[in-house]
Image: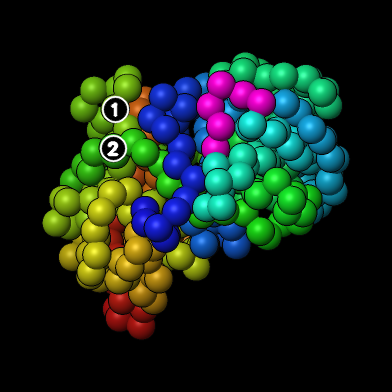
Amino acid sequence: MNHGKHMITIPADVIKQYELFTLVNSPYTAHDEGRAIDLYPPEGTAPSPVSGEVIDIKTVQAPSQPYAVEQDHLIIIDTDVGQRTYYTAGGEPAVARVMHVEPTVSVGDIVEGGESLGNLVRAGFFAPWVKNHLHVGFRAPEANYTRASGSLPLSADIDVEPLRWDGTGTIKEAGKTYAMLDLPEHPSPGDTFVGIADDSGKVAIDGGLPHFDRGGVFGDYTGNLKLLETTIGEVQDGMVEWSPVQVYANTTPIMGLSLFAARTNDFGARLVCPEHSFSVGTEVSVEIQAAGEE
């Protein structure tokens, strides 16, 4: 994604610590503007995406949800002290903000990239179909790092292989609010990240289609974006304003598709369907139609 001439760039070796990532699959403003990344680690881990000094830890009240804890945590790390310093457009060392981790580190600790920050928490900021993850953003050193807004533009310096998908599959995993299909299948789980391709097969798509306002693409692409023979938006500077569309699973209208990049076999088309239950083993055919069409 390209959001400007200067941005914070997350290198490939950092992203490969995690099994899944997304830049825009979130309802929060920072993701809409390409200023945050969500990193999904192996279960039971919370590896730090940066090295540096822990300069502050805040406990924040999360929205009340029956499936989540009441409090979340914000860990502030000064990257100027670490092995890899991230810089602002003005050449200042950036400060990293990490959320959704109950810290086992303390203020004053020096952490290395990949070192555990603590234990992931399931916070009320999450939609019920979202798995536990680290939310990461960066600020200028003099910025107010406790405010929700104000993070710097960022990008992920890693290739995501686009996988074509014809809209079909068999449900391999199901929860109360989601179902995951076995297709498209990751061709070689391990180091390579993959995502669901647009109809051209040129680029993988990122975001909550259409239940979150905006989406994006992994890679350089500009212009009309189609999925399953329907225009879903227009790509500009890596971001997509979704067209008004409706997603159907076996002719049943559902909330949408959750699109992301993954490097493990925990991949496939992910249906967001809180109003409907689908059973494991069910064969599914997904369609996308312009809103108002039948």
Q: Is residue 147 left or right of residue 232?
A: right
The residue located at (41%, 24%) in the rendering is 13
Horizontal side of residue 149 vs 218, given as left or right? right
Find the magenta span and give its range. Answer: 81-86
Q: Position of residue 183 (x, y in %)?
A: 26, 38
Give the residue number, with chain letter if any, for mark 2.
Answer: 159
Magenta region includes residue 289: no
Identify the residue under disc 1. Answer: 192
Under mark 1, the amino acid is Thr
Question: What residue type is disc 2 on?
Answer: Asp
Q: Residue at x 39, y 76 (%)?
A: 244
Are circles 1 and 2 on residues that touch, CB within 8 Å?
A: yes
Which one is nearer the viewer's eye here, 137 or 173? 137
- Horizontal side, residue 195 vs residue 260: left or right: left
Q: Residue furthest left?
A: 200
First in residue order: circle 1 vs circle 2: 2
Mark 1 falls on what kind of element?
A: loop
In the foreground, 146 or 162: 146
Q: Is residue 21 left or right of residue 121?
A: left
